[in-house]
Image (tube, rainbow, N blue to C red):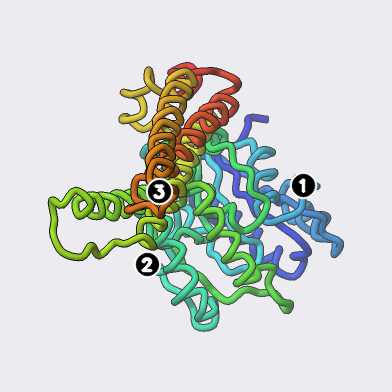
Amino acid sequence: MAAPDVSLIMPCLNEHESLPHCIANALAALAEIERRYGLSGEVLIADNGSTDGSQALATSLGARVAPVARRGYGAALIGGCQAAAGRYLLMGDADGSYDFRDGVAMIGRLIDGADLCMGSRFQGGIAPGAMPWKNRYIGNPTLTGMLNLFFRSGIDDAHCGIRAISKQAFLDCDLSSSGMEFASEMVIKASLREMRIDQVPATLARDLRDRAPHLRPWRDGWRHLRYLLMLSPTWVFGVPALLAMLAAAVIFGVAALFELNWLHGTTPFGTSWQILAGFLLTVGHFAAIMAVATHFYGVRSGYRQLRPLLARWSHWLTLEYALVIGVLLIAGAAATLGLIGIRWTAGGFAPLDSVLPLIVASALGAVGVQTALGGFLLSIIAGHDAAFAPSADQQ
């Protein structure tokens, strides 16, 4: 028989009670998709080790069952999408909380050229008691807002359980999350790969189960948050690096102006502030190395586009240049420290008039060491290649 055009996928772990409703609803949605778009479909249950007979029940109701050994919500959906035969994938939970007929419009968006189409429960409506208040008013808006800030996804409900994606886009995203953070990973990687993401209204009803849901709000909320941070080197490393080094430059600069008598009076940045500036400079430089390293890792892993600025400067981003800059900084710091030592000795080992040169030289020496060692780190991440930035055929 010809392969179906649409695979409607439900992750399942002991959903015997709600499966009859969900599969009937899914078949009605597929019938509407066939009527409206002329596309055939299948219902696929991605079973994650049910022990209540869900597999046999699903088969008897006309669904195809794909066993998924790796445990977890995301693992079940990834296994189901991999086993799906359709070129369009529509997925939703098997607890009766979603109306799969909302997915008809999603398939239409994919036909129109979208790579991923999300449902929005805030646009479609949430039934009383269907979503805990902390999820509705705190967790979801906060995490979705951060996702849009970090990745400019342009959606208002990043964790809606009903969504559609083309099979090719699913493969290109190379998803791997086993838990609830799978919902964020799909949107993030689609955004990073500059895929077209659409959104349509979706409704949320109270689920049909008589047991507690698999979702654990605080645990799964933290898993979502840490995933957002892990996939955003700009915000985790880059922004703190910029702020730290900028603060260090301001402190050192103002202190130097008073030191050279270009500004008069009492400096607001004495010894304590200068020591802090040295700390900020070294920490900020380290964070900058981490930002570049993790960005290149994302590019080589296939879920991130190389930033144009880094592409233009790629011929400078090599191990050799990193070593040269590092050695020059170390040599300059050593020479400065040597001169300070000579002056200190000539002065009979009296306390230094100013510790600013000592702090600046020490901080620059540390930056030089980090630059040299960071160069080797970047080369290792590059696959033991002296050129840090991936070439066009490596992206």
Element under label 1?
loop
Q: Tell whether label 3 touches label 1 (CB within 8 Å).
A: no
Element under label 3?
helix
Q: Amino acid at mark 1?
A: Val
Q: Position of residue 367 (x, y in %)?
A: 45, 38
- Nearer the observer, disc 1 or disc 3? 3
Reading the image, the residue beneath label 2 is 123
Which is more N-terminal, label 3 or label 1?
1
Q: Tell whether label 2 touches label 3 (CB within 8 Å).
A: no
Reading the image, the residue beneath label 3 is 359
Indicate whether 382 appears above or below 118: above
Quadrant position of the N terminus in the picture: top right
Report the residue at 55% width, 24% height from top. 379
Q: Position of residue 305 (x, y in %)?
A: 41, 32
Reading the image, the residue beneath label 1 is 68
Q: Give the Cα separation between the discs numbered 1 and 3.
A: 58 Å
Q: Give the Cα separation between the discs numbered 2 and 1.
A: 33 Å
The one nearer the camera, 254 or 58, is 254
Report the residue at 80% width, 60% height from top. 54
Which is more N-terminal, label 1 or label 2?
1
- Nearer the observer, disc 3 or disc 2? 3
Indicate whether 337 appears above or below 223: above
Q: Residues within 10 Å of mark 2 (few under 14, many from 20)?
A: some
Please identify the residue farthest to the front as the structure is shown: 348
Element under label 2?
helix
Q: Give the Cα separation between the discs numbered 3 and 2.
A: 57 Å
Left or right relative to 54: residue 257: left
Q: Amino acid at mark 2?
A: Gln
| Residue 135 in sight from this viewpoint | yes
